[in-house]
Image (tube, grey):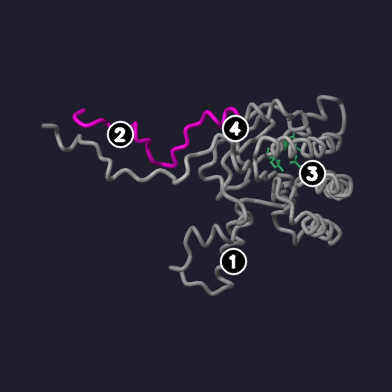
Amino acid sequence: MSDLSLAPAAATVAPLPAEPPAAVPRHVALVMDGNGRWARQRFMPRFFGHKQGVDALVRAVNVFADRGVQYLTVFAFSSENWKRPSEEVSGLMSLVLVAVSKYLTKLAGDGVRIRIVGDRSAVSEKLRKAWEHAEQLTKDNHRITLSVAFNYGGRWDVVQACRRAVAEGLRPEQIDEAWLASHMALSFAPDPDLFIRTGGEMRISNFLLWQAAYSELFFTECLWPDFGAAEIDAALLAYAQRDRRFGTIRPNQVMPEGI
Ligand code: IPE
Ligand code: IPE
Ligand code: MG
């Protein structure tokens, strides 16, 4: 007779997620890093790298959509990026305005739904209006949702959700993970399955701290303006080979009876 303490613990094993993880991520989060170094390698000003970065993003959205990704969330300007020299900050602000006027019609025609996530209070009225227009114009598109995180920080996101709980007069026991998740900036999207960072740094830099709890991480040396279809496919292939367990174990990892 087998030792009961070693018997398979099937009944106590937590159930796997209802849906097995798909080979293609539904939601990809992307830290578009390396524009400055890309420009420096070409003896050009950093702004040139940012400009190329916008073009790289427009190309990448279409590749991700073609591969079946439904949500793409990109880090365009962090809460901490205000610490950069004021010329770079104002250059980035004007670049966003130019990017909207240059690419909005194309993205709208490509079936891209645009959302902006982050603290809008610190940006100009002109930029806020441009974003509202972009969101309004593309709201019924459903090929892919492109969320642009601008003046976004993962810590800001948690704090703004907590502030809403207090403002709504919630009691402590009414606040749980589901409530917070539904009041975070990306409440309209599932959590990111895949988190990519270009540019070689292996850190999160205050991006989606809450939502990336179980994302698969993929870091690449490729600088953002060079991140094209081949690099996207390499990241998606790496993702497809991951074993996502969400804290549980696979049934075939449970010891067979008698062992
Ligand atoms: C990322 O590229 C874009 C923004 C942060 C706006 P960087 O500007 O950080 O480029 P590197 O990291 O200096 O090369
Ligand atoms: C992260 O890149 C933010 C964006 C890509 C918008 P940074 O270049 O600002 O990150 P750190 O400073 O290297 O951590
Ligand atoms: Mg950087």
Amino acid type, residue under disc 3 in the picture: Asp
Q: Find numbered disc 1 in the image and state the secondary structure of the residue it sits on.
A: helix
Along the line of sight, the residue nearer the viewer: 202 or 30: 30
What's the CA distance linking mark 4 and mark 3?
27 Å
Within 10 Å of the Cα at label 2, are there few (<14), some (14-19), or many (20+) other Cα atoms?
few
Q: Which residue is mark 3?
A: 110
Amino acid type, residue under disc 4 in the picture: Phe
Amino acid type, residue under disc 1 in the picture: Arg
Q: Earlier in the sequence, mark 4 or mark 1?
A: 1
In this picture, residue 240 sits left or right of residue 136: left
Quadrant of the image for the C terminus?
top left
Q: Contact, CB < 8 Å: mark 4 with mark 2? A: no
Per the rendered image, the range of residues in magenta is 237-259
Q: Which residue is mark 4?
A: 218
- Asked if 103 appears above or below 38 in the picture, the reply is below
Q: Position of residue 214 (x, y in %)?
A: 51, 43
Q: Position of residue 158 (x, y in %)?
A: 58, 57
Q: Which residue is mark 1?
A: 163
Q: Is residue 212 magenta?
A: no
What's the CA distance linking mark 2 and mark 1?
44 Å
Q: Residue at x 55, y 34 (%)?
A: 23
- The response on whether ligand 1 sits within 8 Å of label 3 is no
Tag count in the figure? 4
Q: Is residue 243 magenta?
A: yes
Q: Contact, CB < 8 Å: mark 3 with mark 1? A: no
Within 10 Å of the Cα at label 1, are there few (<14), some (14-19), or many (20+) other Cα atoms?
few
Q: Residue at x 60, y 56 (%)?
A: 187
Q: What is the chief secondary structure element of the magenta stretch?
A: loop
Q: Which residue is mark 2?
A: 254
Q: Residue at x 62, y 56 (%)?
A: 188
Task: Look at discs 2 and 3 and give the one toward the viewer.
Answer: 3
Task: Look at discs 4 and 1 and give the one toward the viewer.
Answer: 4
